[in-house]
Image (cartoon, grey):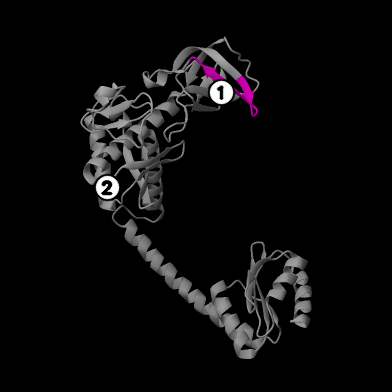
Amino acid sequence: SMTEKLYDIFPYETEFEATVLQAETQDGRLLLVLDRTLFFPNEGGQSCDKGWIAGHAVQDVNLCDDLVYHSLAADAPLRPGMQIHGKIDWAHRFSNMQQHSAEHLFSGFVHKRYGFANCGFHLSDSIATMDFDGPLSAAQIAETELSVNEAIYANVPSRAFFPSPEEAKTLSYRSKKEIEGPLRLLSFEGYDLCACCAPHVGRTGEIGLFKVQSFQRYKGGVRISYLAGKRAFLAARQQFDLLNRLFRDFSANAETLEGFVLKLREELSAAKSKALSVQEKLLRYELERCGESVLFLPDVDMNTARELITSHTKETGRNLFCFIPNDKGYRYIISTAVSDARQAQTLLQTRLHAKGGGSDRLIMGTVDAAMEEIQDVCTILSQTL
């Protein structure tokens, strides 16, 4: 009672008739096995097809022991022996076909040119990534990206087929793992031959567009995030729209925008440096003029505050309990000359549910409490530390 995998042979078909072989409720879902299906399951790093069976939404599709399990709502009135009509979500299927076919072309070029193998692939509704077992430079990735788009323009046909064991021995093809059972190969004429279980476009031109989004080092090799087809077009349109808004808002164009942004960054850096200098002077003034151990300071940079507060504690031998406002209450810095500052953390945590930590001379953290509540606790701290 093996499920006939129609998606192997008819990647462009969207509707089919089938007989229910099994219908079992499990974990709040109805698991349905059919004698034949167009629904591609979660397999080979690719997410499953979406669609409907007898008008009921298919929530998930998985393959186990050559049976394809379709997951539906538990109340779907389907039982063994029933004849059903199935329909896949074509827009979702075609998008996956575009992404996966583009990955084959890119991986084929990488393997031929640089000798690296595709050792990982993940395709979902929001992510498309491919992993290679060796490093690729930015220039190599850009060159391969261009080659993929040129292969798309060439509009060559694809071919999915099951070679006999004898024929398979004569073919040079890519594969991530040893194949058990029937071998299915996907060929892009003149570009790549690879073992694959998924539906693909009939001609490379249907991919439309390929664009690398980003890349990073990964397990000694590289992980590449990319988009193809409509996904790539929508992302490009979004970025063009953003650029046009920036051109308009800053009265710039493609030639002048980068220089304008760099100038803004330099001005911002100078302004931040000036602000830190002013904050440092203000904080020094507050520390020197105040004889109290408890200070409620203005909103200042925490790194600057930490350095000045610990330095002041060493110079004067004073314990300082400093609180700086933030969105949810206060950030705090408690610096002690001789006493164990961790006692203060324990009391703040017990009385005010503060969160923080540190050493015996310095603790830092946050507390969501009113000034009066903090002052009461600090009165106790001043007496005990």
The structure residue drawn at horizontal position 72% and vertical position 70%, both measured from the top left corner, is 346
Judge whether 204 appears above or below 265 on screen. Answer: above
Circle 2: residue type: Ala
Q: Nearer the viewer, residue 15 or 239?
A: 15
Crowdedness near tag 2: few (<14), some (14–19) or many (≥20) residues, C-alpha within 10 Å: some
Mark 2: which secondary structure?
helix
Q: Nearer the viewer, residue 149 or 97?
A: 97
* Residue 257 occupies quadrant: bottom left
Find residue 99 and report its horizontal and vertical position in percent.
37, 34
Circle 1: residue type: Ala
Residue 142 is tagged as 2
Q: How many marks?
A: 2
Which secondary structure dominates the residues rendered in magenta? Answer: strand
In the rendered image, the residue lying farthest to the bottom is: 316
**Of the image marks 1 and 2, the number of the one nearer the N terminus:** 1
Judge whether 321 appears above or below 100 on screen. Answer: below
Find residue 54 and report its horizontal and vertical position in percent.
55, 15
Q: Is residue 41 magenta?
A: no
- On-image quarter of the C terminus: bottom right
* Residue 96 occupies quadrant: top left
Is residue 117 something that shows in the picture? Answer: yes
User: Is 354 left, or right, of 96 in this rendering?
Assistant: right
Find residue 377 and report its horizontal and vertical position in percent.
77, 73
For the record, the magenta segment spans 24-35
Q: Is residue 25 magenta?
A: yes
User: Is 290 left, or right, of 217 in this rendering?
Assistant: right
Is residue 11 something that shows in the picture? Answer: no
For disc 1, the marked residue is: 57
Mark 1: which secondary structure?
strand
Q: Nearer the viewer, residue 294 or 137?
A: 137
Judge whether 137 appears above or below 175 on screen. Answer: below
